[in-house]
């Protein structure tokens, strides 16, 4: 039997939230095909949509990842979903929302699949050292100043391997939920569980309880205590990742025992064979 695909009514029937997916005057959207759910959520934000609107799609033709990468989004192979938030938080705390979203996504995936998810700074979901999902948080420019500034949280989770042609060079890098858990996962239930877990961590952050969320992030961290390589722009840093600060930054100690505080960049973790992934 082919699995249920993402569908608005089914998604909403599972929804147990109070804020996310409950935006007054704005319907949630599930598209068969769209360019990027983040772009559509930004459009709604600029049109004045309140926080909580959810935009998801069965397929994206212009899915985007971090650092200008493409996020391959074939039909029904993954969950492609974006949430519009308007966090009443100081800008310095916005990076923590990204880490908190990682915690929410890990909890949701674990709940529906039974597998244990790791988190790689800044916000990759991993299983068995491979990438299962990622998060792209963006602040669209040009929003009216009447509402708190919008933050779009886009999440991509690899669900069904057999609906995606994984290029050979990615075979050892990415993993899907069906191969990781041994069964098919209902994308509607995953999306609704993700909305609920995101609302839970978001509520914690709004009530100034970021330390609870950061503690959970660290428990799932595959980065802390490991040899890492951080690339970004022209810079390259190698060392040991030792901690995450309260503002979400990664602490790396290099070979000369010098401490570096990393706010952005691509982090690769060194494997036992000396390669970085
Ligand atoms: C990453 O590079 O790890 C982040 C990937 C984020 C992909 C998701 S899929 C839904 C949303 N729409 C996009 O275009 N990107 C994000």
Image (cartoon, rainbow, N blue to C red):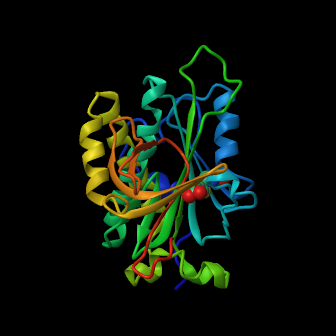
Relative image position of residue 265 (x, y in whole percent): 56, 50
Identify which residue is drawn at 30% across, 72% down: 114
Q: Residue furthest top?
A: 146
Q: Is 36 placed left or right of 276 in the picture?
A: right
Relative image position of residue 211 (x, y in whole percent): 25, 38
Relative image position of residue 124 (x, y in whole percent): 47, 59
Identify which residue is drawn at 64% across, 31% down: 45
Task: Depth check: give the residue in front, 69 or 80.
Answer: 69
Give the mark count: 0
Relative image position of residue 201 (x, y in whole percent): 34, 42
Task: Depth check: give the residue in front, 168 or 117.
Answer: 168
Q: Residue furthest front?
A: 256
Q: Is 38 placed left or right of 103 in the picture?
A: right
**From what the image shows, is residue 180 above or below residue 44?**
below
**From what the image shows, is residue 60 above or below residue 251?**
below
Ligand 1, what quadrant?
bottom right
Asked whether the viewer can see residue 208, the reply is yes
Task: Depth check: give the residue in front, 39 or 76.
Answer: 39
Identify which residue is drawn at 32% across, 73% down: 115
Asked whether the viewer can see residue 56, the reply is no
Identify which residue is drawn at 42% across, 24% down: 89
């Amino acid at each position: 039997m082919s699995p249920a695909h993402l569908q608005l009514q089914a998604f909403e029937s599972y929804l147990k939230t109070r804020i996310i997916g409950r935006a007054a005057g704005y319907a949630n959207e599930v598209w068969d095909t769209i360019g990027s759910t983040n772009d559509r959520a930004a459009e709604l934000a600029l049109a004045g949509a309140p926080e909580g609107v959810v935009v998801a799609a069965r397929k994206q033709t212009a899915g985007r990842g971090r650092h200008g990468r493409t996020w391959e989004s074939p039909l029904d192979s993954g969950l492609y979903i974006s949430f519009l938030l308007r966090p009443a938080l100081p800008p310095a705390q916005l990076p923590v929302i990204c880490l908190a979203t990682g915690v929410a996504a890990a909890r949701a995936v674990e709940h529906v699949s039974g597998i244990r998810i790791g988190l790689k700074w800044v916000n990759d979901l991993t299983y068995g050292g491979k990438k299962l999902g990622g998060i792209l948080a963006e602040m669209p420019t040009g929003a009216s100043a009447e509402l708190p500034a919008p933050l779009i949280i886009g999440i991509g989770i690899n669900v069904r391997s057999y609906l995606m042609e994984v290029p050979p060079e990615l075979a050892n890098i990415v993993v899907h939920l069906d191969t990781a858990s041994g069964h098919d996962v209902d994308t509607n239930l995953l999306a609704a569980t993700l909305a609920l877990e995101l609302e839970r961590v978001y509520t914690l952050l709004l009530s100034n309880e970021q330390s609870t969320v950061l503690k959970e992030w660290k428990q799932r961290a595959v980065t802390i205590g490991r040899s890492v390589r951080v690339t970004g722009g022209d810079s390259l840093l190698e060392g040991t990742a030792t901690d995450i600060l309260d503002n979400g930054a990664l602490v790396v100690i290099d070979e000369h025992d010098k401490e570096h505080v990393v706010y952005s960049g691509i982090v690769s973790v060194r494997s036992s064979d000396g390669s970085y992934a």
